[in-house]
Amino acid sequence: MTYKAALSFADGKTLFCTVQKNERLLDAALRSGITLPLDCREGVCATCQGRCESGLYTQDYVDDEALSAADLARHKVLSCQTRLLSDAAFYFDYDSTLCSKAEPGRHRARVTALERPSARTAILHVKLDGEAILDYLPGQYARLHIPGTEQSRAYSFANASGTGTLQFLVRLLSDGVMSDYLRERCEVGDLIEFEAPLGTFYLRHVERPLVMVAGGTGLSAFLGMLDELAEQGGCGHPVRLYHGVRDVADLCELARIEDYARRITDFTFVPVISQPGAAWAGRRGYIADHLDQAAVGERPFDLYVCGPPPMVESIKAWREAQAAQDARLYFEKFIESHA
Ligand SMILES: Cc1cc2nc3c(=O)[nH]c(=O)nc-3n(C[C@H](O)[C@H](O)[C@H](O)COP(=O)(O)OP(=O)(O)OC[C@H]3O[C@@H](n4cnc5c(N)ncnc54)[C@H](O)[C@@H]3O)c2cc1C
Ligand code: FES
């Protein structure tokens, strides 16, 4: 038995594929040449997510950090875990052109520098080895293989594409495979293999004010987007960047952000510190406490959120509470992988 699936995309295109009974939607799409973005294939990373608009389906494993109970109630699905029980229609919140691009390639790069702006943060600089440039959309991510291990971890590009150099902003955990490598063994010249580009979190064509919300090293994805906007001198709309960190030492790339303020018309940076010392005169607490309508300014706006899952969920809840559904929401959760 086969079912028909209609896959529509943000650019208005609809593509069709047949899905065998018991076949996963992602596999059926790939079989038909529709290369839906994917990463883990295990229901964890949420890269393959979409929304069912009609039809019956079941899902195998869905990690609760990938899709919340509220997401499931809204018929959000992970296409790598979805099997059809009838003909069905799905919506994917990115342009269909992302599906016609070649699947993520394997690449190599050499470490050129490792900065340690704070005890909890590292900035890894690498240069491509064997190719001149890597094409990706700012906001997308790479899966880096950790030298000397069999493991890999996902990191958002922290600079715009178009050069042979890449940056990654990494939160150092007290106990983590990548964290330990960066803290203890990483040296200039190390070879790092990676897959890229991955993900569907990227800056869409800007048609309204932009509100960017970064939790911790979630800033990385926005650095890539802001590099691109700075190149263009802005986007014709206000751009607000909120950055939430635990303490002042975790604020990083401040000189770069000041430079954005000079180069991007109507750009504002709002740092929010959850556990500041007495000397901190800026905003305290969590970003959701400071995203009032006055702070956001004109509506409607596009809301981009990137960082740890609880922070992303708090901003989604803020949007619900404000009835700010006219704010188009795009987000990337930094879900930890134990692969
Ligand atoms: C799409 C995406 C983009 C991301 N981008 C970034 C980014 O730009 N910057 C960034 O800093 N992070 C990013 N992350 C998170 C990143 O991929 C890693 O999860 C994070 O850096 C931790 O890696 P680690 O190897 O240091 O720690 P891990 O080894 O993964 O350990 C993480 C935590 O889990 C615990 N742990 C380890 N193994 C197990 C286990 N088997 N069972 C239970 N607990 C365990 C460890 O003690 C530690 O506290 C992103 C994640 C995703 C999904
Ligand atoms: S590819 Fe489906 S959740 Fe990761």
Image: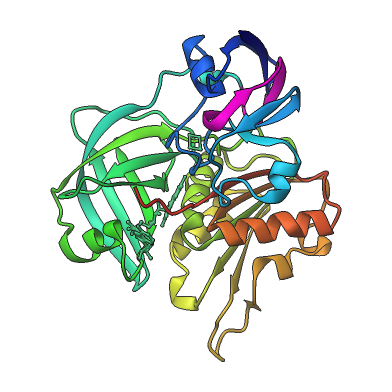
Residue farthest to the bottom, as pictured? 278
> Along the horizontal axis of the image, is 292 left or right of 224?
right
Viewer-nearest residue: 16 or 192:
16
Viewer-nearest residue: 113 or 312:
312
- Residue 210 picture location, percent across and down: 69, 47
Viewer-nearest residue: 89 or 146:
89
Give the magenta part as a residue range. Answer: 79-95
- Residue 73 picture location, percent across and down: 75, 43
> Along the horizontal axis of the image, is 5 left or right of 150?
right
> Along the horizontal axis of the image, is 329 left or right of 30?
right
**Above/below status of 211 relative to 197:** below
Task: Tell me if I can see residue 98 in this picture.
Answer: no
Question: In the figure, residue 104 lies in which quadrant?
Answer: top left
**Above/below status of 28 relative to 264:** above
Q: Identify which residue is drawn at 55% across, 89% down.
A: 279
Q: Identify which residue is drawn at 84% across, 58% down.
A: 322
Question: In the figure, residue 102 lies in which quadrant?
Answer: top left
> Along the horizontal axis of the image, is 331 left or right of 221?
right
Residue 61: in magenta span? no
Q: Identify which residue is drawn at 55% across, 81% down.
A: 275
Viewer-nearest residue: 39 or 243:
39
Task: Tell me if I can see residue 51 in this picture.
Answer: yes
Q: Identify which residue is drawn at 47% across, 31% down.
A: 38
**Above/below status of 314 relative to 22:** below
- Residue 24 picture location, percent across and down: 53, 23
Q: For the N terminus, which image quadrant?
A: top right
**Above/below status of 250 relative to 192:** below
